[in-house]
Image: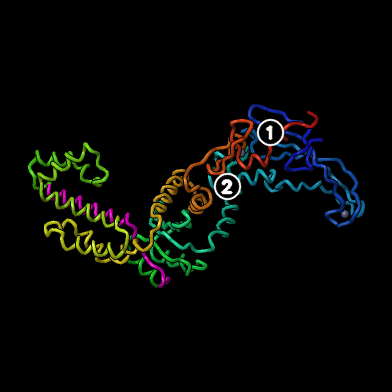
């Protein structure tokens, strides 16, 4: 007799399709050997049966229900009646355990309403299963500290939060409900093996620097090039604006029209753009000075050692024309306060795009998460969002998974997820005898 592959004791007798719903009916074959009430051994006497309707995970993209005829027993010793236990079933939610697994796996990836529609249960049930599962996930979250830690202030659910990423392994480590030094200190203090952190990349905030110095005195702190170059670009913009304000209308319009050429790095210019830019710089010598200052500051990052960068910065600073110092003041100030941390990035080549990618992932989760609480958002970011951001939806169980785990089925072009392979929908999903 054919039976469920995954649930060997089950026998499916009939499958009916009503529109987009499958209703399978069957029995469970294991015989009960002792009374659950008094513990008496020996076969219990049959005492009729009871029909129970259970939810299964979607199969072939359809809601699936299994109607099982459960035996009822009466104990000869104590007279108590009991129902045949079903170990593959979660009695609390009247569903197969694999359906519960499916909801748990999906609740960090899909909206609850969508899962409720796919499975065919109340959204409240999904919410209940999800919140319990997310609590468990959160309790077993991060235990070991990364070697390269990136910290960034981000916005989620309309409030500023603190995001932590492992720059070495390219993954999100945590998301804190509140930003600020106290929040950071609390997080670092609860972290096991925090002494393994070699380098922390932060934004230019004094309070974060002080907190890290006091808790991790031997850890290097760096400011990512993204932050300091953004300030260099803003300073350059201010210099160009100051110059254009002093120009006549026609010349100013010409400058505004070609602004995009100025903001590009010289290596990004096409052959057609180069002569236009050269002409522009030749016309305004002061603009040429500001442009060179911006380019030379960016060029620091093409040097291969900290010593070279430090020396080149000293030369850059010495030769910065006096008339540009006012516009470049934000950069000069940042460098005077953060020079050591900026130069650290030559000592520690880390993947700086990790925080940018992590923030993009958070935005994607945030868009999906309107109306959800912070713990759910956090769980989705930590446990549901693949770092590449790419997912696929399985046509069989309607689950969403990271694209990396997709598997091609040899016989067809259909893609199957690990969940469907476990359900073995194509093999078991037919009634006995066919
Ligand atoms: Zn008994
Ligand atoms: Zn699937």
Q: Nearer the viewer, mark 2 or mark 1?
A: 1
Residue 396: percent from the left, percent from the top? Answer: 62, 35
Q: Quadrant of the N terminus?
A: top right
Regarding mark 2 in the picture, which secondary structure is present there?
A: helix
- Please indicate whether residue 352 sits to the left or right of residue 396 in the image: left
Q: Are marks 2 and 1 in contact (CB under 8 Å)?
A: no
- Please indicate whether residue 335 sits to the left or right of residue 97 in the image: left
* Depicted 219 relative to depicted 239: above or below: below
Q: Which residue is drawn at 13% across and 50% down?
A: 242
Residue span colored magenta: 215-243
Residue most toward the left?
248
Q: Residue at x 43, y 61 (%)?
A: 149
Q: Which mark is residue 127?
A: 2
Give yes or no for residue 220 being in the magenta stretch: yes
Chain-order first, disc 2 or disc 1: 2
> For the residue carrying disc 2, how many other residues have a C-alpha within 10 Å: few (<14), some (14-19), or many (20+)?
some
Residue 12: percent from the left, percent from the top? Answer: 77, 35
Residue 172: percent from the left, percent from the top? Answer: 47, 54
Q: Quadrant of residue 153?
A: bottom left
- Please indicate whether residue 318 sits to the left or right of residue 171 in the image: left
Q: Is mark 2 within 8 Å of ligand 2?
A: no
Image quadrant of ligand 2? top right
Regarding mark 1 in the picture, which secondary structure is present there?
A: helix
Give yes or no for residue 234 being in the magenta stretch: yes
Q: Residue 426 carries which label?
A: 1
């Amino acid at each position: 007799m054919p039976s469920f592959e995954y649930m060997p004791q089950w026998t499916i007798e009939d499958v009916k399709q009503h529109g987009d719903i499958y209703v399978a009916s069957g029995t469970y074959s294991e015989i009960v050997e002792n009374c659950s009430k008094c513990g008496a051994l020996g076969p219990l006497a049959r005492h009729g049966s009871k029909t129970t309707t259970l939810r299964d995970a979607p199969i072939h993209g359809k809601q699936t229900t299994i109607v099982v005829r459960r035996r009822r027993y009466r104990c000869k010793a104590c007279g108590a009646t009991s129902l045949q236990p079903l170990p593959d079933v979660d009695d609390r939610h009247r569903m197969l355990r694999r359906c519960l697994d499916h909801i748990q796996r999906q609740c960090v990836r899909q909206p609850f309403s969508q899962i409720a529609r796919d499975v065919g249960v109340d959204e409240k049930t999904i919410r209940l299963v999800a919140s319990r599962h997310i609590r468990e996930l959160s309790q077993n979250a991060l235990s070991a500290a990364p070697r390269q830690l990136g910290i960034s202030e981000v916005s989620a659910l309309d409030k500023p939060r603190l995001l932590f990423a492992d720059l070495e392994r390219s993954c999100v480590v945590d998301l804190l409900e509140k930003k600020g030094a106290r929040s950071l200190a609390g997080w670092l203090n609860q972290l096991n093996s925090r002494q393994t952190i070699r380098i922390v990349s932060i934004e230019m905030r004094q309070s974060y620097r002080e907190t890290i110095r006091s808790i991790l005195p031997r850890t290097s702190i760096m400011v990512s090039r993204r932050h300091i170059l953004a300030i260099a670009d803003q300073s350059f913009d201010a210099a160009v604006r100051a110059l254009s304000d002093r120009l006549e209308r026609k010349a100013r319009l010409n400058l505004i029209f070609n602004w995009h050429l100025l903001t590009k790095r010289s290596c990004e210019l096409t052959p057609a753009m180069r002569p236009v830019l050269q002409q522009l710089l030749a016309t305004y010598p002061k603009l040429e000075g500001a442009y060179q200052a911006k380019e030379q500051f960016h060029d620091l990052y093409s040097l291969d050692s900290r010593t070279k960068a430090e020396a080149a910065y000293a030369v850059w600073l010495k030769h910065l024309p006096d008339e540009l110092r006012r516009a470049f003041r934000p950069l000069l100030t940042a460098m005077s306060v953060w020079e050591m941390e900026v130069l650290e990035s030559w000592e520690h080549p880390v993947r700086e795009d990790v925080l940018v990618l992590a923030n993009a992932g958070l935005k994607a989760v945030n868009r999906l998460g309107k109306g959800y609480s912070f713990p759910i958002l956090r769980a989705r970011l930590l446990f549901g969002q693949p770092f590449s951001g790419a997912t696929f939806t399985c046509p069989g169980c309607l689950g969403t998974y990271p694209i990396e785990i997709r598997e091609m089925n040899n016989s067809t072009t259909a893609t199957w997820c690990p969940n469907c392979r476990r359900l073995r929908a194509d093999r078991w999903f037919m009634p006995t005898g066919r």
